[in-house]
Each structure stands twice: as C-alpha cells, then as structure tokens.
C-alpha cells in the first residue's frame, strides 16, 4: 500500500503531468492490460450465455417452462449480481482494483463449474433441494462473483487511458459482451453435443481460476486519476461518500437519459440472448451445437465488430462532435429493428443468420457508449460508482426482467395456441422434452414409444402440434421485444442534447 500511496503522490506532484496525453505505462503494457481485462470480460459473458446455449437439453431434463427458464437466465443471475455491484464498486474506489477483479473471477468460475453438478439433494430418501433450486443457487453464485468485474475494470481503463482514447478503449473492452456470447456458442455448443450440457459448464468454468492468478501477478494498480487532464479535479486519497457521488450523478441529465436507453436496450438484448438459441433450435430443429455454430456465433461476431466500430467512430469524430458517442448508437438501435424482424420471420437459416447478424452489428454499439458516457460525465473519484449505479439499473430492470418477460410472452402465445387446438393446460416444457428424447433415441426409433416413455408422456397429436406452435410462440415474443429497440434509440438521442454540457473531460 505504501508504494501505491507514493505513486499516487508522485502523480499529483507532476509525475503524471503527461498522463492525460500518454496514459499509464508503455503502449505495449497498456495493450496487455486492456486485452487481459477483455479476456476476463469475455469469460464473464461466456459463463452467463452458456445457459442459453444449452437451453433445450437443460429444459428437457429439468422440465421447466419458458418463464422459469427466463427466471434462470434473468432474475436468478441479475438480482444479487446487481445488489452486490454497488458495495463492490465503493470498495473499488479505495482498494486495489486488480485484486478485486481477480478474486471475483475465481469465484464466478468455480460456481460456473459447480453448475454442471446441479442435481436433486436427497437426505434420508427425501428431496430437500430440487435440481432446479441447486441450478438457481449456482447462477446466484456466478452473479455475485461477476459483480466484481465491470465497475473496477472500467475504472482501471480510465486511469490507463487518457480521455481522448477512452471511447475506443472502452469500446474494445465492451466487445467482451458479444465475443463472450459468441464463444459460449462455439465452444459450449460443441461440448454439449459431444458430452452433454453438464460438461459444458465444468470445462468452461475452471480455466477462469488460472487466469485470475495470472491477472494479479502481472497487472499493476495505477494511481487514480493518472490519465486525467491537469485541470481535472484530483484529490488523491480523498474519499467520496455515496450520497455526494449520487448527487454528482443526479446533476448530469445525460447520465440518466443514457442509462434509460441502455436499460431498454439491455431489456431487449438479454431477452433475445436468452431465447435466440432456443428459437433457432425449435424453428429449424437443430441441436445446441448446430444452432450455435451456424447462426448464433456469426451473429454475435458481427455484434462484437459493431461494438468496437462505434467506439472507433466516436473517437474519430470527437473533434467535430463530442456528442457522436450518443447519436451514433441512437441510429444503430433504431436501425436494428427491421433487421431483427427479417431474421426472426425468415424461413431460411441463411437469411435468419444474415438478419440477426446485421441487427447485432448496428445495435451493440450502445455498449461502448454506455461505458464512455458513464465515465465521462463524472469526476475520477466517482467512476466506479457511476458505472455500478448504471449497471444496477440496467441489470435489475433490463437483465432481471427481460428474459422472464420473454418467457412469459412465449408461454402466453403457446398457451393460447394450445387451447385453440384442443390441448388446454399443455405447456412447451413437454415439447422440448419430447424433441430431445426423439433426438437421443436416434434414427428408426418408434416415436409413439418414445413419447409414451417420457416422465410426462404426450400424445402424437400433441407432438405434431408442438412442431409449429412452439416455434411461433417464441417468434412472437422475439418480434414484440425487438420493436422496443426503437425506444432505446430515442433515449440515446435525448442524451445527445445535454451531453456536451455534462462532460467533465472533453
């Protein structure tokens, strides 16, 4: 701690006089740190997205409806992830951010691996905890761990990179959302097809522990405010209490209009991410690995490119328009709507992949914007807290409610169709279980016998009904949610009108 204090004092007395131009450390070392943080962010989204990748085989084994699956992918993860985020961010304002990220990474990686062992807990012949509840508790554990990643990482990037380069650096870091989701599909889908969904969690969870050790051994904690301009407010060692930090944020309308837009975008994005793979598997009758490799992975790769392109464009246009970081994502979010409609209504796998890829490309730029704006409108002592407050709102309302809402919509549309077809009370959980059982039985299996052998048997007529109704119910849910991206775009557009005034480092 003594060496950190000395470094901070040196920064204040002129040791960092060029920090606002060059940043902390050499160019090569800054790149190493940024890439290390990107890899960790990728791991966090690989672990989050994996549940959606294995959706159908997991649902078939556990026997849950779309709503309860949405609760697993949304609220089950997001609630404690969000609640723990602000206290961890407050600690990050005072303590070593590198160690906080390293400990958090090790924790969530272990809980991801534990997810693969989810099963009924039986004591004395009585089930005291169902497999679903064990799975839910593991997701809560992953959420608690991941709460210690993004706020301190954003704060670190702001101290490593000067204001003029932060939007591109944060846009690069934000690629972790889409790259992580893409890799969860590529790697997790293939592991699921080869070994089952449980091994996907075990194999993909454990490497994070080794990476956590490497992080704390090789990444330095920079002095706070090192890369801010000389005239920026910098009082090394000063403590900013939560209420003054909130007061500062309340004085910046740009922060709140951006947060509203990012929250709506997250509501739509997490809902679609939670059910996109399930929709594709249901519509085109694909395995988890096939859906991941042929459609999901290209779509999320396009999203990763779109994220970094937005940050790069905003940096290039900074001299002419400091508000570009707001209006570029506003255009992208609105423009994504017709492409999502095209993707989710196409009967061709190729056109579905193209529509979703373009939608992801033009939409995901808001991620670079949300981090750049939340960092740029507050003083350096409040950066981790502003990121945590933003993420609190985004994750409670967006991540927490988006996937369950998508599940409710899917269940509702399926229930309506089932009642109309003469199968009242029939749920899509039976459809997923039947489809997985038929696939596992192999070619030439007697379909009637397979359906009769399910833990909850269904008739051949019900199975025939499933083929179209299950896909259409999920499709209607995705289409309704996709249209809401236009609302997110309007919020970012509103942010543009106050952003120039609110920016601390221009």
Image (cartoon, rainbow, N blue to C red):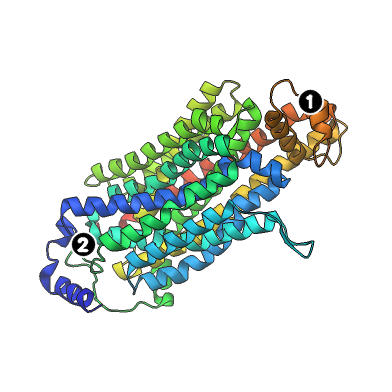
Residue situated in front as seen by the camera: 448 or 295: 448
Of tags 2 and 1, the one toward the viewer is 1
Mark 1, other Cα within 10 Å: few <14 / some 14–19 / many ≥20: some
Residue 32 pos. (x, y %): 25, 51
Disc 2 to disc 1: CB gap under 8 Å = no
Q: Which mark is residue 227?
A: 2
Residue appearing at x 79%, y 33% in the figure: 417
Q: CA distance from mark 2 to mark 1?
A: 66 Å
Q: Residue at x 52, y 50 (%)?
A: 202
Is residue 138 found left or right of 309 in the rendered image?
right
- Earlier residue among tags 2 and 1: 2
Please, is residue 113 above or below residue 339 in the view?
below
Quarter containing the C terminus: bottom left
In this view, the residue in front, 192 or 360, is 192
Residue 498 shows in the view: no
Q: How many marks?
A: 2
| Residue under label 1 | 447
Which residue sits at x=53%, y=58%?
Answer: 111
Q: Secondary structure at mark 2?
A: loop
Task: Give the image location of residue 27, x and y in percent.
Answer: 17, 51
Q: Report the residue at 12% width, 69% height from top.
A: 15
Q: Dot 2 surroundings within 10 Å: few (below 14), some, or many (20 or more)?
A: many
Q: Quadrant of residue 16?
A: bottom left
Q: Position of residue 466 (x, y in %)?
A: 76, 30
Give the answer, above or below, for where 392 lies relative to 288.
below
**Viewer-side residue, 103 vs 353:** 103
Quick check: 450 left or right of 72?
right
Residue farthest to the front?
124
Q: Is residue 349 among the parts visible in the rendering? A: yes
């Amino acid at each position: 701690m003594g060496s950190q204090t000395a470094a901070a004092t040196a920064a204040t007395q002129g040791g960092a006089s060029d920090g606002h131009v060059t940043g902390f450390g050499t160019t090569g070392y800054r790149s190493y740190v940024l890439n290390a943080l990107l890899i960790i962010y990728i791991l966090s989204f690989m672990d989050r997205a994996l549940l959606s990748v294995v959706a159908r085989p997991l649902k078939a084994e556990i026997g849950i409806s779309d709503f309860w699956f949405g609760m697993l992918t949304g609220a089950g993860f997001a609630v404690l992830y969000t609640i723990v985020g602000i206290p961890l961010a407050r600690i990050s304002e005072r303590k070593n951010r590198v160690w906080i990220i390293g400990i958090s990474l090790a924790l969530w990686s272990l809980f991801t691996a534990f997810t693969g062992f989810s099963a009924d807990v039986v004591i004395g012949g009585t089930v005291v905890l169902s497999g679903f509840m064990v799975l839910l508790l593991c997701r809560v554990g992953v959420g608690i761990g991941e709460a210690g990643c993004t706020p301190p990482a954003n704060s670190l990037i702001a101290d490593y990179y000067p204001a003029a380069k932060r939007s591109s650096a944060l846009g690069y870091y934000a690629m972790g959302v889409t790259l992580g989701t893409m890799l969860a599909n590529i790697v997790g889908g293939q592991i699921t097809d080869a070994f089952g969904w449980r091994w996907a969690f075990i194999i993909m969870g454990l490497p994070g522990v080794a990476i956590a050790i490497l992080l704390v051994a090789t990444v330095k904690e920079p002095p706070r405010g090192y890369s801010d301009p000389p005239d920026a407010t910098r009082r090394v060692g000063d403590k900013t209490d939560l209420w003054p930090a909130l007061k500062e944020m309340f004085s910046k309308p740009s922060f709140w209009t951006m947060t509203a837009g990012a929250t709506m975008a997250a509501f739509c994005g997490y809902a679609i991410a939670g059910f996109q793979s399930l929709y594709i598997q249901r519509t085109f009758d694909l395995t988890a690995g096939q859906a991941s490799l042929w459609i999901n992975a290209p779509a999320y790769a396009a999203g990763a490119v779109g994220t970094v392109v937005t940050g790069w464009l905003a940096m290039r246009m900074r001299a002419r328009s400091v508000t570009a970081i707001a209006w570029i994502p506003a255009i992208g979010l609105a423009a994504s709507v017709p492409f999502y409609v095209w993707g989710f209504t196409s009967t061709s796998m190729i056109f579905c992949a193209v529509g979703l890829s373009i939608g992801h490309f033009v939409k995901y730029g808001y991620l670079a914007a949300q981090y750049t704006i939340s960092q740029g409108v507050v003083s350096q002592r409040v950066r981790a807290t502003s990121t945590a407050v933003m993420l609190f709102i985004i994750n409670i309302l967006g991540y927490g409610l988006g996937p369950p809402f998508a599940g409710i919509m899917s269940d509702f549309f399926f229930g309506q169709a089932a009642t109309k077809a003469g199968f009242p009370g029939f749920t899509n959980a039976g459809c997923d279980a039947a489809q997985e059982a038929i696939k596992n039985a192999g070619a030439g299996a007697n379909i009637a016998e397979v359906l009769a052998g399910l833990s909850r048997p269904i008739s051949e007529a019900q199975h025939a009904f499933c083929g179209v109704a299950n896909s259409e119910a999920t499709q209607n849910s995705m289409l309704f949610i996709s249209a809401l991206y236009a609302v997110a775009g309007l919020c970012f557009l509103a942010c543009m009108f106050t952003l120039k005034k609110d920016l601390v480092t221009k």
